[in-house]
Amino acid sequence: MIFDHRTYTLKAGMVRAHLAQYEQYGFKTQSRHLGQPVLYATTEVGDVNSYVHVWAYKDLADRTAKRAALWADPEWLDYVKRSQELGALIKQENMILVAAPFFKLPTA
């Protein structure tokens, strides 16, 4: 199992607006293609203008196939356009993490 860990840094004061737009236009579509995220969280301490989300995949091939389907979906492209127009994003950092052999996702 691998995890796609993403950190997004936004312009000051834009986290709430950015996440509201994502909830309205992006989350349903992204979840339809990628499944439910392992984590979607804002930052309480540290860079409060950032948030993190983590998605789980069987392997890199699974991630590649699911993300290709996502980027072919007109609803996702509409969300991306809206996000660009909002102009909140400063940077995005991605890491692919490999689960330790003993790790299992919690079921609840």
Image (tube, rainbow, N blue to C red):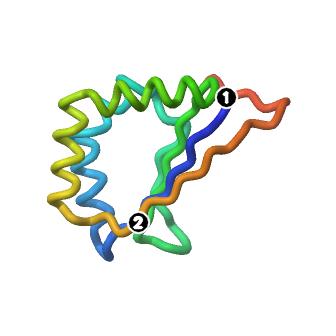
**56 above or below 82?**
above
Crowdedness near tag 2: few (<14), some (14–19) or many (≥20) residues, C-alpha within 10 Å: few
**64 above or below 17?**
above
Query: Mark 1 or 2 closer to N-term?
Result: 2
The residue shown at (21%, 38%) is 77
Check disc 2 and report the residue beneath it. Answer: 91
Q: Position of residue 39 (x, y in %)?
A: 53, 42
The residue shown at (15%, 59%) is 85
- Give me the disc on residue 24: none
The residue shown at (44%, 65%) is 50
- On the image, which quarter does residue 75 sit in? top left
Figure disc tally: 2
> How far apart in space, not on screen, are marks 1 and 2 (Cα)?
30 Å
* Left or right of residue 70, residue 54 in this image: right
Q: Position of residue 100 (x, y in %)?
A: 81, 37
Q: Which kind of residue does numbered mark 1 sit on?
A: Pro
**15 above or below 19?**
below
Crowdedness near tag 1: few (<14), some (14–19) or many (≥20) residues, C-alpha within 10 Å: few
- Secondary element at image label 2: strand
Q: Which kind of residue does numbered mark 2 sit on?
A: Lys
* Left or right of residue 79, residue 60 in this image: right
Q: Position of residue 94 (x, y in %)?
A: 53, 53
**77 above or below 47?**
above
Check disc 1 and report the residue beneath it. Answer: 106
